[in-house]
Image (cartoon, rainbow, N blue to C red):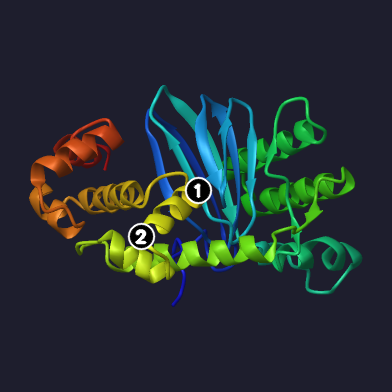
């Protein structure tokens, strides 16, 4: 079974890179993964981020670096948060002719043998230069040659991390790697059956574990219970459907696996900070 992953086309076929900017009071990004590298600059506020099975609180100014294939989630519902995210395929940086930098740095990063540090904070070595180049990537969107500016900035970031000794060999143990693959398999099952009734037994069977052990295992890996994860993902799916303006709130609830409209509304408001109808109306106004 293919593990669930975020399937989003990044940029263009010639330049697969996207820059996302957010200012929000609520951040709820369910546990997921994608083959691209992701760099996040938290400009203001705080949020909790989980990468693989490590959770920590990111603060204003932090730069979070997520290697391709890593499971990750972000959550925040207390105060305004502003952050920028750069997501790109590492193949973007390939040279037509091999050179020492490609062999020593780019190829190992693409193959997951060389990893970026999890976080850089103000005062850390390399932080100032990495932040400078990150800001350059964002600002380049308004220039005449954004792709050239962004490519140069990405090379600068990786070169700075390499020269500063911040890149390290992947140290995931066989046991950790196996756990990550089990979680990916379960997430794929959830994603494929999100509109159906999902039982704890079905999820634990998918992981080939007892229900009791699976609950503990999933919570350690994902930072939340299986049922909490399912509900978070269902609300994310509901947001996508409501943005199209073609589906009613009731139909959206049913389509995302909620058999109680009142519970769907309560859960949506708790996670998103406003009701489904308000969310739908807000997005209609924005569009």
Image point (54%, 38%), residue name: 84
Quadrant location of the C terminus in the rendered image: top left
Which residue is at a point 25% across and 61% down the rendered structure image? 199
The answer to whether one can see residue 246 in this image is no
Q: Residues within 10 Å of mark 2 (few under 14, many from 20)?
A: some
Q: Which mark is residue 241?
A: none
Disc sitting over residue 220 in the figure = 1
- The answer to which of 225 and 127 lies nearer the viewer is 225
- Asked which secondary structure carries label 1, the reply is helix
Residue 136 makes an appearance in the image: yes
Q: Which residue in the structure is indicated by mark 2? A: 211
**Label 1 crowding class (10 Å Cα cut-off): few <14, some 14-19, many 20+?**
some
The x and y percentages for residue 154 are: 72, 50
Asked which secondary structure carries label 2, the reply is: helix
Give the answer, above or below, for where 213 lies relative to 22.
below
Position of 115 with respect to 54 (left or right) is right
Where is residue 227 shown, x and y percent of the image?
Answer: 31, 50
């Amino acid at each position: 079974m293919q593990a669930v992953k975020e399937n989003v086309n990044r940029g263009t076929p010639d330049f697969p890179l996207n820059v996302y900017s957010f200012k929000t009071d609520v951040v709820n990004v369910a546990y997921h993964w994608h083959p691209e590298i992701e760099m996040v600059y938290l400009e203001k506020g705080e949020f909790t981020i989980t990468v693989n099975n490590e959770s920590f609180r990111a603060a204003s100014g932090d730069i979070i670096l997520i290697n391709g294939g890593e499971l990750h989630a972000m959550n925040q519902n207390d105060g305004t948060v502003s952050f920028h995210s750069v997501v790109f395929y590492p193949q973007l940086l390939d040279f037509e002719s091999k050179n020492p930098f490609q062999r020593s740095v780019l190829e190992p990063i693409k193959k997951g043998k060389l990893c970026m540090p999890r976080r850089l904070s103000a005062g850390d070595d390399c932080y100032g230069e990495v932040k400078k180049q990150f800001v350059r990537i964002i600002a380049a969107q308004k220039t005449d040659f954004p792709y050239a500016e962004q490519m140069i900035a990405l090379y600068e970031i990786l070169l700075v991390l390499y020269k500063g000794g911040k890149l390290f060999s992947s140290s995931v143990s066989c046991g950790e790697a196996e756990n990550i693959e089990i979680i990916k398999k379960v997430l794929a099952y959830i994603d494929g059956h999100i509109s159906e009734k999902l039982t704890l037994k079905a999820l634990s069977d998918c992981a080939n574990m007892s229900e009791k052990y699976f609950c503990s295992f999933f919570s350690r890996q994902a930072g939340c219970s299986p049922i909490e994860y399912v509900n978070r993902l269902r609300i994310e799916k509901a947001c996508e459907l409501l943005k199209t303006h073609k589906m009613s709130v009731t139909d959206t609830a049913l389509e995302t696996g909620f058999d109680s409209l009142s519970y769907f509304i309560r859960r949506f408001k708790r996670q998103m900070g406003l009701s489904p109808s308000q969310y739908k109306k807000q997005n209609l106004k924005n569009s």
